[in-house]
Image: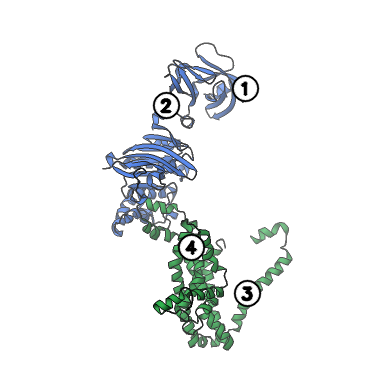
Chain colours: A blue, B green
């Protein structure tokens, strides 16, 4: 059954003065990660899907099941949605044992106490928590609490699993271990899985597909490889480590403000131009020869990352980051405020429709 | 703590020490006097005499009934005040917590005017059902509930407000309807506030005097609770008054010990 479920959500909702307007599709068997800066509306979107936030308008369906449709006026309350929710701070019931926490969803669905506990115990064992079954949440480690929260969400066999920053409450060492473990549990769950995170590493490890939310809107959606190659917002470009500028293209030229970039080829019209920091070269004198994109620039920031140095420059183009070796910094005696020439090969610039 | 505070300026201010000591003596001495004056050898006889035991029984039944009634009605009111918005909410909160500061005898007079035989509601009770409340044990329960319930309401409302509502959301995502969430998540989580509110309400009901004597009267065995009996005995048989007072002191101490963590969490 779970094999063919697809979540379709078109969500317009408010939380206080904040609005989100986002649409997403998530097929079963894939992990869709909602990524975005803090305050982008990721959690609100997740809560709307779970029914914890009412839609201002929109429609959420899980295959044939309409969870909410404002034009029809239908709305399933949260307790009737086939959803499992893992909250950021887990929200394990502090007055119940780990076992009773896991059994809660089964009891809520009318299972008898003994049967619910037996089934919950299977999940407790599957997640390696047998020794903690009788413990109250206060006595569990972060990783154990995370497993209990996952078991509690999965025990009712939901068709849709929602995880809000599932690793954020863990300390750094537990996070690395649980990231791998969680990735495995997610793959075992056949339904639709939607994960919210603001951690790029977590996003890349868990995601089959990424949806980037910014200011309550979808900035970009697609496979991680696509986002990495062709980011469509400053946030995504920053997260994948590329320079991104907007311009207007005519054949092999892109005008960016007053400046003009020569590119291998570009679709006519508004374009994004991405430039890898390593393909920006710095010179103390105007270079002669092959690189055709040359600009006078001033250094506004220098950030050492061990074997690489990120140099932020302003020129006729918007601010760009170039990545050079520490040797180059010394050789060119680069410092903040000094003027340099920057050069980029046309073949290392990618222009794509905005 | 005290030492750390006093350290920067040396010794604490003498005037504060003297006045503070006077306050402590003023509060503690009467209780010590009560103990010293207690006819200890006579205590068993005094505490088992007929008017005293009947006052005990009545007080116990009435105060526990008032506590139960406060829970039954006060819990929903606390929930409404904590979790819902409705017009006039501030007014409702003010009126329902007024008995906290109102002189109880005024409450008793007010109850008499509404529920007494000729009162707004009371005359209907009388003419439709032939019920007269004055001089009955139910009147004692009503008077005590009137004075005690606000303690439960504000304590439970506070508990509900400090409860993280996301636990209830978590219960909802696990398929729990509102009743199950209330029963298995909300109530257990506000358990400490609920217990504290009930103990406070019970202690208040047990000590109730003014509203009871005004609204229910002073009939031995029917409406004469321990505080009323203390007052009467004081005029006839001081030993009995002291014995009954000692019992109330012991009860108060137990309540204080039960609630100390709530009032002085650090200490």
Chain-order first, disc 2 or disc 1: 2
Q: Name the chain under label 2.
A: A
Q: Mark 1 points at which residue?
A: A338
The crowding category of the residue bearing disc 2, from other C-alpha atoms within 10 Å (few below 14, some 14 to 19, many at least 20), is some
Q: Are marks 4 and 2 in contact (CB under 8 Å)?
A: no
Q: Nearer the viewer, residue A129 or B189?
A: B189
Query: Going by the image, does B265 lie left or right of A183?
Result: right
- How far apart are the alpha carbons under marks 1 and 3? 79 Å
Q: Name the chain under label 1.
A: A
The crowding category of the residue bearing disc 4, from other C-alpha atoms within 10 Å (few below 14, some 14 to 19, many at least 20), is many
Q: Which residue is drawn at 49% across and 82% down?
A: B55
**A97 vs B212: above or below:** above
Q: Residue at x 62, y 22 (%)?
A: A338
Q: Residue at x 55, y 67 (%)?
A: B98
- How far apart are the alpha carbons under marks 4 and 2? 57 Å
Q: Do labels 1 and 3 share a chain?
A: no
- Using the rendered image of the protein, determine whether residue A167 is visible from the camera's viewpoint: no
Percent x, y for residue B102?
57, 70
Q: Name the chain under label 3.
A: B
**A246 vs A190: above or below:** above
Name the residue at the top extreme.
Answer: A289
Q: Mark 2 points at which residue?
A: A229
Q: Mark 3 points at which residue?
A: B28
Secondary structure beneath dot 4 equals helix
- How far apart are the alpha carbons under marks 2 and 1? 32 Å
Q: Are marks 3 and 4 in contact (CB under 8 Å)?
A: no
Percent x, y for residue A46?
40, 43
Name the residue at the left extreme.
Answer: A1
Secondary structure beneath dot 2 equals helix
Q: Do the residues labelled 1 and 4 touch (CB within 8 Å)?
A: no
Q: Are marks 3 and 4 on the same chain?
A: yes
Q: Mark 4 points at which residue?
A: B156
């Amino acid at each position: 059954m779970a094999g063919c479920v697809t979540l379709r959500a078109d969500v317009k909702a408010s939380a206080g003065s904040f609005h989100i307007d986002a649409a997403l599709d998530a097929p079963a068997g894939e992990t869709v990660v909602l990524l975005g800066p803090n305050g982008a509306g990721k959690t609100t979107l997740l809560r709307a899907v779970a029914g914890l936030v009412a839609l201002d308008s929109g429609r959420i369906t899980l295959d044939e099941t309409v969870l909410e449709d404002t034009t029809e006026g239908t709305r399933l309350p949260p307790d009737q949605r086939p959803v499992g929710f893992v909250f950021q701070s887990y929200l394990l019931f502090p007055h119940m044992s780990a076992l009773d926490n896991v059994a809660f969803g089964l009891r809520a669905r009318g299972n008898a106490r003994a049967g619910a506990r037996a089934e919950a115990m299977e999940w407790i064992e599957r997640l390696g928590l047998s020794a903690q079954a009788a413990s109250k949440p206060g006595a569990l480690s972060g990783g154990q609490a995370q497993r209990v929260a996952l078991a509690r969400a999965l025990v009712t066999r939901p068709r849709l699993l929602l995880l809000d920053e599932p690793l954020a409450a863990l300390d750094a060492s537990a996070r690395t271990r649980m990231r791998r473990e969680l990735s495995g549990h997610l793959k075992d769950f056949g339904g639709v899985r939607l994960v919210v995170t603001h951690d790029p590493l977590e996003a890349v490890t868990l995601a089959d597909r990424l949806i980037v939310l910014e200011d309550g809107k979808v900035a970009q959606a697609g496979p991680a490889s696509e986002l990495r190659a062709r980011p469509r917002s400053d946030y995504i470009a920053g997260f994948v480590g590329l320079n991104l500028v907007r311009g207007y293209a005519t054949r092999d030229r892109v005008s960016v403000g007053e400046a003009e970039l020569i590119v291998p080829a570009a679709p006519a019209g508004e374009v994004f131009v991405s430039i890898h920091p390593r393909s920006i070269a710095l010179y103390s004198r105007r270079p002669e020869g092959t690189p055709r994109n040359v600009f006078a620039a001033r250094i506004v920031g220098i950030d050492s990352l061990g074997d690489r140095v990120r140099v932020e420059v302003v020129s006729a183009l918007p601010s760009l980051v170039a990545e050079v070796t520490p040797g180059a910094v010394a050789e060119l005696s680069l410092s903040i405020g000094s003027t340099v020439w920057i050069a980029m090969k046309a073949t290392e610039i990618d222009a794509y429709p905005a | 703590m005290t030492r750390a505070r006093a350290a920067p300026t040396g010794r604490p201010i003498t005037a504060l020490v003297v006045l503070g000591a006077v306050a402590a003596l003023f509060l503690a001495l009467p209780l010590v006097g009560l103990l010293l004056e207690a006819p200890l050898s006579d205590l068993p006889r005094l505490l088992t005499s007929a008017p005293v035991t009947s006052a005990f029984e009545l007080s116990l039944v009435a105060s526990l009934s008032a506590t139960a009634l406060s829970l039954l009605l006060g819990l929903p009111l606390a929930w409404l005040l904590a979790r819902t918005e409705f017009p006039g909410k501030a007014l409702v909160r003010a009126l329902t917590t007024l008995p906290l500061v109102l002189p109880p005898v005024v409450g008793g007079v007010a109850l008499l005017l509404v529920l007494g035989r000729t009162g707004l509601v009371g005359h209907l009770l009388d003419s439709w059902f032939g019920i007269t409340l004055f001089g009955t044990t139910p009147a004692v329960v009503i008077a005590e509930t009137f004075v005690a319930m606000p303690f439960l309401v504000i304590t439970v409302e506070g508990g509900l407000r400090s409860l993280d509502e996301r636990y209830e959301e978590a219960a909802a995502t696990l398929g729990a309807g509102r009743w199950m969430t209330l029963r298995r998540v909300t109530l257990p989580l506000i358990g400490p506030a609920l217990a504290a509110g009930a103990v406070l309400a019970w202690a208040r009901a047990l000590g109730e005097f003014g509203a009871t004597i005004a609204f229910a009267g002073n009939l031995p065995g029917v409406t004469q609770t321990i505080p009323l009996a203390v007052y009467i005995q004081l005029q006839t048989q001081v030993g009995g008054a002291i014995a009954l007072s000692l019992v109330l002191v012991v009860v108060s101490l137990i309540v204080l010990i039960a609630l100390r963590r709530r009032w002085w969490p650090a200490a």
